[in-house]
Structure formats: C-alpha cells, structure tokens
Image (cartoon, rainbow, N blue to C red):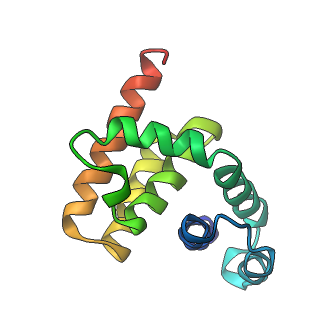
Amino acid sequence: MGRKQARDRSFKLIFEYIFTKEIDDELMEEYISESDVSGEEQYIRDVYFGVANKFEYLSEKIEKLAIGFSFHRIFKVDLAILLLASYEIEFMPKIPFKVSVNEACELAKLYSTEKSVGFINGILAKMKEGNDAGH
C-alpha cells in the first residue's frame, strides 16, 4: 500500500513543481512523514528530485510524443502524471514498465478526465517503443 500513496504524493509534488519550478522541501518532508508512505520515503525523494533535475529532458520527450497536442495545452495534471511515469520508465529500471503505466492510468482516473487515461497510455506506449528501438 505504501508505494501507491508514495506515488500519489510524488505526483502532487511534481504538479506543484510544474508551476513554481522550485523544490518544496517543507511539503516533501510533510508528505514523507505521513504514515501511509512508510518505507517509501526514498522513492518520493528520488522521483521528486529526479523529475526536477530532468524536467527539461522529460518535457521535451513528452512534447515529441504528444503529436497533435500543443505541449503548453496539455492538462497540467496529465503532464505531472506523464513526468512521474516517464521518470520511472527512463531512470528506475527496477519498476516494471507495466506498473508505471498502470499506476499512471490510475492517477489519471482519480485526478483527471476519462480521455486523459487514453492520452497518457498512448504517450507512454510510444515512449516504450522509442526505448525498445534504442532511442
């Protein structure tokens, strides 16, 4: 149960980062201190700092794969989910691709629109194809 909550907290931290472009150590520590993320503190730190450090790289990758969508018009909720999942896919090889995609779709069902689930799934599938092709 802890990883699901940790992913949820990480998503919320990334969502805020999209707007501020600043790490909020205080909020991160508040989330880490919550009992339902017990044992997943390092995951939250790794993902949050990782997305912040690779923000431009991940954003460019998402933008290239979001064919027909203006990057700046992607719902910020969807962008936060895509940043989280793409970070896992690119930089956390111990997390299976299917887990990253399933969890991203679950976050979209919870926080975004029905159409967003398909959009996110499609972008992540293209990302996997690109990685499998050695790009």
Give the residue furthest to the top: 134
Picture layout, residue 91 above or below residue 110? above
Picture layout, residue 105 above or below residue 123? below
Look at the image and tell me whether residue 1 can be seen: no
Picture layout, residue 101 above or below residue 36? above
Picture layout, residue 111 above or below residue 21? below
Name the residue nearer the viewer: 47 or 63: 63
The picture places residue 24, in percent across and down from the top left corner, at: 74, 74
What residue is at 48 percent from the left and 18 percent from the top? 135
Task: Say left or right for 107 vs 24.
Answer: left
The picture places residue 35, in percent across and down from the top left corner, at: 73, 84
What residue is at 61 percent from the left and 64 percent from the top? 3
Res 81 → quadrant: bottom left
Name the residue nearer the viewer: 70 or 125: 70
The picture places residue 116, in percent across and down from the top left corner, at: 26, 61
Res 42 → quadrant: bottom right
What residue is at 55 percent from the left and 64 percent from the top? 18
Name the residue nearer the viewer: 78 or 96: 78
The picture places residue 129, in percent across and down from the top left corner, at: 37, 25
What residue is at 77 percent from the left and 67 percent from the top? 41
Count every numbered label the image shows and give the total.
0
Look at the image and tell me whether residue 46 can be seen: yes
Task: Say left or right for 10 vs 35.
Answer: left
Which image quarter is the N terminus in? Answer: bottom right
Task: Say left or right for 76 vs 10.
Answer: left
